[in-house]
Image: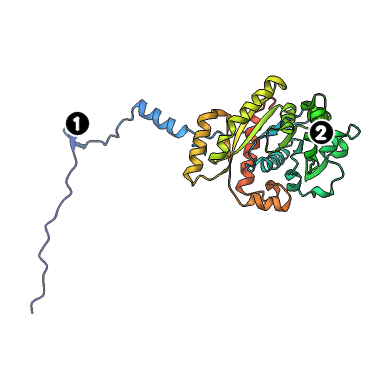
C-alpha cells in the first residue's frame, strides 16, 4: 500500500495593515491612535469617583474625623435622650454613646431619669439595693451630688442611678416652686467636673421629661425605623418648642437617630426616607442597625463597646460619637 502523502497546504502570508509612503517612497505602517477624551468626559469621570458612597439614610456618607483630645474637663454639655414612645433605643443609646464618648477622652455622667431604672440595670446595678438615688437628690436638699453618683465600671463614665422611687417625684414636684428647674438645680455642681451629661428620659412627656429638657442644651431623639414610632415625633417637637419658648431658650435638637434599622426590609427604608424628607439634615448620617449583641450586652450589664468591642454595633456608636462631637459648637 503506497504511503499516505498529505497534499501541500497553500501558504497564507499575513495581510498587511494600512500603510503610507514617505518622501523617499518607503512604505511605513500607519500608527494606531487612541480616541481623544473630551474635557467634559474627563470631568464627569473625576466627579463620579470623587463622590462619597450613599449611606443608609440615602445621603452621601461623610467621613467624621477623630475627636481632638482635651486636656481640661468641665463646661459640660447636657443632652436629653427623649422620645415619648417606649422601646425605641433611648437607654441603649445613652449607655453606648456615653461609653464611646468616654473612649474618646470625654468625662461623661449618665443620668437615669426613668422610674423603671433601665439605665441603672443596664450597667449592672440592682435597683432594690440602692441606698441613694436621683429621687433623694431631687427631694432632699441635704443630699449632695457626690453622695449619689456611682462609678459605671467604664473609665471616665459615672452614673446617677434611679429606681421606682422616682415615680413619686413627679407627684411631689407639682407643689414645688419652679418645679420645672429642679433637675437643673441639682445638676449644676456637675457641670464643672464633666464634659458631657446624658439624661435618659422616661417614655412620656410629663413633668420629669420637662425637667430634663429644661436642664439640657440639646436633645437627641432616638427613633425606631417603624411607622408607629414616626407618628409621635411631631408631638415631641411641639413639646420641645414650648420648653424652648417658655423655660429654656438655648434648647435645640442635636439630631434624630434612626435605630433598629434593617436595610433588608422595604419598610425600614421607607421610614428612613420619610424621616429624612421631614427632618432633613437634622437626621444623623449614622444609623444603628439591629443586632443581638445589644441584648447580650444588656444582660452582661455593660456597654457593647466593651462587651463586643469589634462588633458592628460598637462601631456604629463610635461613629455616632464622632458625628455628635462634630455637631456641637465647642467641638
Q: Which quadrant would the N terminus be assigned to in this image? A: bottom left
Residue at 64% x, 51% y: name it: 293
Q: Nearer the viewer, residue 11 or 323?
A: 323
Residue 178: image quadrant is top right
Q: Is residue 90 left or right of residue 180?
A: left
User: Which residue lies under the disc numbered 2?
Assistant: 172
Q: Residue at x 67, y 43 (%)?
A: 92
Quadrant including the C terminus: top right
Inspect this view and state whether residue 191 appears: no
Residue furthest toward the right?
Answer: 142
Q: Earlier in the sequence, mark 2 or mark 1?
A: 1
Residue 37 is situated, as x and y percent measured from the top left of the image, at: 33, 30
Secondary element under disc 2, as helix, strand or loop, is helix
Q: Looking at the rendering, which quadrant does residue 157 occupy?
A: top right
Residue 250 visible (yes or no): yes
Q: Secondary structure at mark 1?
A: loop
Q: Position of residue 263 (x, y in %)?
A: 51, 44
Furthest-left residue in this view: 2
Outermost bottom residue: 1
Residue 265 image offset from top left, x and y in percent: 48, 46
User: Which residue bears the numbered disc 1?
Assistant: 22
Mark 2 surroundings within 10 Å by alpha-carbon count, few (fewer than 14), some (14 through 19), many (20 or more) = few
Q: How far, Cα to Cα, is label 2 from label 1?
A: 105 Å
Residue 266 drawn at (x, y percent):
47, 43
Q: Local crowd at mark 1 within 10 Å, few (<14), some, or many (≥20)?
A: few
Q: Nearer the viewer, mark 2 or mark 1?
A: 2
Q: Quadrant of residue 170?
A: top right
Q: Nearer the viewer, residue 95 or 115?
A: 115
* Residue placed most toward the observer, 147 or 234: 234
Its colouring scheme is rainbow
Amino acid at each position: 500500500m503506497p504511503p499516505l502523502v498529505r497534499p501541500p497546504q497553500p501558504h497564507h502570508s499575513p495581510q498587511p495593515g494600512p500603510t503610507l509612503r514617505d518622501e523617499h517612497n518607503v512604505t511605513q505602517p500607519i500608527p494606531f491612535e487612541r480616541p481623544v477624551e473630551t474635557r467634559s468626559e474627563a470631568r464627569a469621570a473625576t466627579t463620579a469617583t470623587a463622590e462619597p458612597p450613599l449611606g443608609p439614610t440615602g445621603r452621601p456618607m461623610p467621613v467624621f474625623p477623630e475627636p481632638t483630645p482635651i486636656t481640661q474637663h468641665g463646661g459640660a454639655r447636657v443632652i436629653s435622650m427623649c422620645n415619648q414612645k417606649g422601646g425605641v433605643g433611648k437607654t441603649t443609646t445613652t449607655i453606648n454613646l456615653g461609653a464611646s464618648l468616654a473612649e474618646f477622652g470625654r468625662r461623661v455622667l449618665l443620668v437615669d431619669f426613668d422610674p423603671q431604672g433601665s439605665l441603672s440595670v443596664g450597667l449592672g446595678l440592682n435597683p432594690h439595693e440602692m441606698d441613694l438615688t436621683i429621687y433623694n437628690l431631687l427631694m432632699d436638699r441635704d443630699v449632695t451630688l457626690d453622695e449619689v453618683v456611682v462609678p459605671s465600671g467604664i473609665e471616665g463614665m459615672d452614673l446617677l442611678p434611679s429606681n421606682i422611687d422616682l415615680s413619686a417625684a413627679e407627684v411631689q414636684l407639682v407643689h414645688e416652686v419652679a418645679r420645672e428647674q429642679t433637675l437643673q438645680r441639682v445638676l449644676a455642681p456637675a457641670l464643672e467636673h464633666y464634659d458631657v451629661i446624658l439624661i435618659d428620659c422616661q417614655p412620656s412627656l410629663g413633668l420629669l421629661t420637662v425637667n430634663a429638657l429644661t436642664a439640657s442644651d440639646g436633645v437627641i431623639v432616638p427613633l425606631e425605623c417603624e411607622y408607629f414610632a414616626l407618628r409621635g415625633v411631631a408631638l415631641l417637637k411641639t413639646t420641645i418648642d414650648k420648653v424652648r419658648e417658655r423655660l429654656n431658650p438655648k434648647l435645640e435638637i442635636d439630631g434624630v437617630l434612626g435605630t433598629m434599622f434593617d436595610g433588608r426590609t422595604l419598610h425600614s427604608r421607607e421610614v428612613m426616607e420619610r424621616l429624612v424628607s421631614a427632618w432633613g439634615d437634622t437626621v444623623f448620617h449614622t444609623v444603628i442597625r439591629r443586632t443581638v449583641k445589644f441584648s447580650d450586652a444588656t444582660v452582661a450589664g455593660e456597654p457593647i463597646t466593651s462587651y463586643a468591642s469589634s462588633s458592628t454595633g460598637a462601631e456604629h456608636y463610635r461613629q455616632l460619637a464622632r458625628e455628635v462631637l462634630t455637631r456641637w459648637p465647642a467641638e
